[in-house]
Image (cartoon, rainbow, N blue to C red):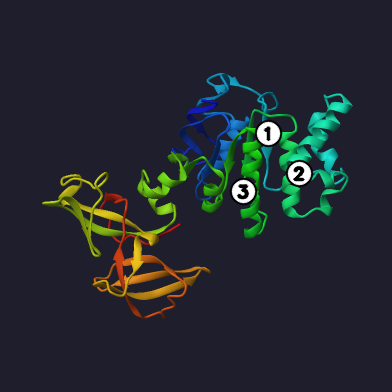
């Protein structure tokens, strides 16, 4: 593996005892892979990024990159010696320098012709060769972020770290830039670790995504697995839209089933066996895309709330038995709040956890 973190911990003196900012995090990234860290504010994702960069000392654990030990017990390689580039959310461009001079800033040790050639190369890579002589304030926010990316790539780092680089941009521009930057990183073959709070951004960019909570890495996996096979209840709650509904594991002639207020659910590969939970009672994750609007279905639900999302509505529904579920419904099915509609489950992956009482919708 190109980047390997083993039981990495970061501790701040002002933090409450027993709660490390980063708590024994382990992960790996292969050469050319893009990893993304997501999680709520204060979960430790930026602290972990800073530890990899060398801006924070480890309280424990080990960081290796391309066979080199960057940090370990008694070892702390200085940030400037790690061959790591960083892109920050505030761009950190020098306002008194032109675009090309900003990019060339980290290349001062190169001969002038080589410096000019490399600057032109990375500006062309990010699509800003035409803006080389402009000042940063003459560019849009998205263009400034591209300059920051070009500057970080110019010294040919082995690893690129990006700390919420799109947080100052509007949603449409964030989406476009996320796809563009993934393309640029894939073209260069550089390994990258990215921090964001936006799930869709993470899904658009990451080969591997880590969900962090209270300093710990809950799951390090691809986007599909995070969504459909969450390893912990927190990941299930944090990713996507859904609720936890009460279920009971039962044995039938056809095999184990999970009985829910919407009927029986089965999954040949992942349905829990009887005895997996106390009294066979569990909570079942029901995503909004697991619930289909079907007026012919025997189960009815009352619309409590609806949110228009262009091509679809997100309906919040209440069953007659009192349980709440969410459903994505095509926007031409424009029912009114208070109306009763038919629904049925279409669940490919039955995801269950030990029973808890009074769970709120998992509207991540």
Q: Position of residue 138 (x, y in %)?
A: 84, 54
Q: Contact (CB < 8 A) between labels 2 and 3? A: no
Residue beneath disc 2: 147
Callout 3: few (<14), some (14-19), or many (20+) C-alpha neighbours within 10 Å? few
Q: In this view, does 65 lie above or below 92?
A: above
User: Element type at marker 3?
Assistant: helix
* In the image: residue 144, left or right of residue 43: right
Question: Residue 110: which quarter of the image?
Answer: top right
Residue drawn where x is 37% and y is 81% of the image: 338
Q: Contact (CB < 8 A) between labels 1 and 3? A: no
Q: How far apart are marks 2 and 3 (CA)?
A: 16 Å
Residue drawn where x is 29% and y is 55% of the image: 284
Q: How far apart are marks 1 and 3 (CA)?
A: 20 Å
Q: Indicate which disc, 1 or 3, sits on the residue closer to the N terminus.
A: 1
Q: Where is residue 147 in the image (x, y as percent from the top left)?
A: 76, 44
Quadrant where the image shows the C terminus:
bottom left
Mark on residue 227? none
Mark on residue 85? 1
Mark on residue 179? 3
Residue drawn where x is 47% and y is 33% of the image: 25
Callout 2: few (<14), some (14-19), or many (20+) C-alpha neighbours within 10 Å? many
Q: Is residue 119 above or below residue 274?
A: above
């Amino acid at each position: 593996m190109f980047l390997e973190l083993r039981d990495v911990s970061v501790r701040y003196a002002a933090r409450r005892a027993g709660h490390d900012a980063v708590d024994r995090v382990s992960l790996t990234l292969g050469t050319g892979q893009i990893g993304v860290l997501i999680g709520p504010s204060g979960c430790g994702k930026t602290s972990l990024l800073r530890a990899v960069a060398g801006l924070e000392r480890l309280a424990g654990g080990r960081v290796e990159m391309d066979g080199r030990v960057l940090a370990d017990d008694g070892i702390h390689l200085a940030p400037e010696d790690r061959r790591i580039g960083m892109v920050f959310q505030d761009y950190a461009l020098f306002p008194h320098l032109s675009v090309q001079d900003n990019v060339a800033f980290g290349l001062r040790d190169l001969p002038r012709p080589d410096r000019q050639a490399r600057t032109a190369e990375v500006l062309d890579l990010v699509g800003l060769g035409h803006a080389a002589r402009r000042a940063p304030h003459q560019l849009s926010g998205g263009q400034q972020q591209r300059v920051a990316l070009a500057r970080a790539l110019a010294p040919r780092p082995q690893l690129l770290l990006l700390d919420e680089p799109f947080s100052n941009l509007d949603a449409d521009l964030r989406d476009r830039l996320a796809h563009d930057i993934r393309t640029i990183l894939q073209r260069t073959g550089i390994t990258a670790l990215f921090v964001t709070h936006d799930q869709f951004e993470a899904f658009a960019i990451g080969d591997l995504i880590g969900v962090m909570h209270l300093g710990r890495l809950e799951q390090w996996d691809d986007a599909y697995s995070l969504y459909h096979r969450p390893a912990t209840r927190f990941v299930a709650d944090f990713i996507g839209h859904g609720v936890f509904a009460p279920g009971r594991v039962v044995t039938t002639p056809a095999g184990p089933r999970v009985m829910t207020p919407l009927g029986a659910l089965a999954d040949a590969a992942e349905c829990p066996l009887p005895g997996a939970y106390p009294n066979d009672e569990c909570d079942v994750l029901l995503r909004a895309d697991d619930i289909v609007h079907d007026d012919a279905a025997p189960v009815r639900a009352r619309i409590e709330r609806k949110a228009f999302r262009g091509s679809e509505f997100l309906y919040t529904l209440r069953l007659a038995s009192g349980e709440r579920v969410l459903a994505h419904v095509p926007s031409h099915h424009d029912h009114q709040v208070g109306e009763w509609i038919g629904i049925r489950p279409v669940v490919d992956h039955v995801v269950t956890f030990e029973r808890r009482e009074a769970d709120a919708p998992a509207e991540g």
